[in-house]
Amino acid sequence: MVRAWHAGIDIGGSRVRLVTDYRGPGRRRVEYADMPGSYEELLKLTGELMARATGGELEGTGNEAVSPSPAQTPAAVACGLPGTSDGSRTKFMPPLPWLDDKPLAADLADMLGAPVTLANDGHLTLLAEANEGSAAGRDSAVLVAVGTGIGGAMMLGRKIWRGHHGSGGAWGWLPHAGHADDPRHGQFEQAASGRALDRAAAALTGDPDGGSAARQGRDLVLAAREGNPGALSALHAYATGLGRGIAAIASAIDPEVVLIGGGLSAVMDLLRPVIERTMAEAASPDGRTIPVRAAALGPEGGAVGAWHAARGGTEIWL
């Protein structure tokens, strides 16, 4: 009897990740690579990642069909996206404009020989956290995913709320003082995304245009850890802006917990005190009591959630 296996793909703003249980339920494997610059390259790369995850046993990893044997064909694949889709075709991908309006599910299905479903990456990350991370055992939770942009999700009654158009939890579109309207990037995203942290690092060095690795947000965080006063001040200002958005979300939704996902989950030890102080000042009385925690699964959460979605069918969605 052929054992069914599943795969989850996470297409992020800067990387592609893939999770499979091809080797067995307790032997999940993660593969990843930097994001390419075109749709055709993305399809080819996804095929290559699948071949690596299955030990090279899937052949034909270009844009052509893989034509695997039954044992090599996943029962189902789910794919997370940094934007919206209708479940089969991409719609609006803010960090990857070349991915707008593409028949991604059909193209991946043709290549991998398996049914493919598209979903929002924030929704899938919260699904993973609910199954095996910081939201496990909770009835309600909110995820604020901070990476290249700001996205997220909310869980109600242990199900993920997708929204009418599939964009529920798009927290980056919250208003934020001091930022102008932009058709691709909301004000809160402009103020508190990973790119905003990069800009803060660049401004600290006197080059507001940025552009070098030494001026990225990760280096600002490292300098703050080393006690650099300017870096600490810049990080405090950034975390205050992030905290104001989280205060609004916590007050309006009233979940059991707010999770911070994306790349910033690794620096919550620095950000949490400022976020909590800001929430104490800006959130509703109930919102002030809601805990803010780092997502447990880190940057692999979206791919792990896609794997859960491939296994779980439609009953996980609200």
Image: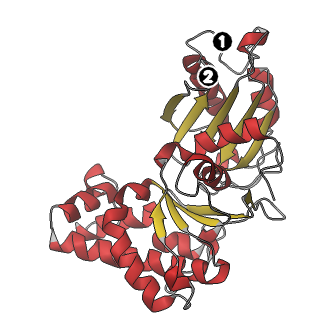
The quadrant in which the N terminus is found is: top right
In the rendered view, how is the structure colored? secondary structure
Q: Residue 46 at x, y = what percent?
A: 62, 28
Q: Secondary structure at mark 2?
A: helix
Q: Residue 106 appears in which quarter of the rendering?
A: top right
Q: CA distance from mark 2 to mark 1?
A: 7 Å
In the image: residue 40, left or right of residue 157:
left
Crowding at dot 2, Cα within 10 Å, few <14 / some 14-19 / many 20+, comes out as: many
Looking at the picture, tell me which residue is in the foreground, 196 or 209.
Answer: 196
Q: Residue 95 at x, y = what percent?
A: 58, 54
Placement of 284 over or under 85, stated as above or below: below
Q: Secondary structure at mark 1?
A: loop
The quadrant in which the C terminus is found is: bottom right
Crowding at dot 1, Cα within 10 Å, few <14 / some 14-19 / many 20+, comes out as: many
Residue 41 visible somewhere in the drawing: yes
Placement of 216 over or under 69, stated as above or below: below
Looking at the picture, tell me which residue is in the foreground, 235 or 296.
Answer: 296
The tag on residue 50 is 2
- Amino acid carrying label 2: it is Met
Residue 67 visible somewhere in the drawing: no
In the image: residue 227, left or right of residue 237:
left
- Amino acid carrying label 1: it is Leu
The tag on residue 245 is none
- Which of pointers 2 and 1 lies earlier in the amino acid sequence? 2
Q: Residue 314 at x, y = what percent?
A: 83, 46
For the point 83% across and 50% down, the residue is 86
In the image: residue 78, left or right of residue 209:
right
For the point 54% across and 18% down, the residue is 52
For the point 65% across and 82% down, the residue is 252
Looking at the picture, tell me which residue is in the foreground, 140 or 284.
Answer: 140
The tag on residue 58 is 1
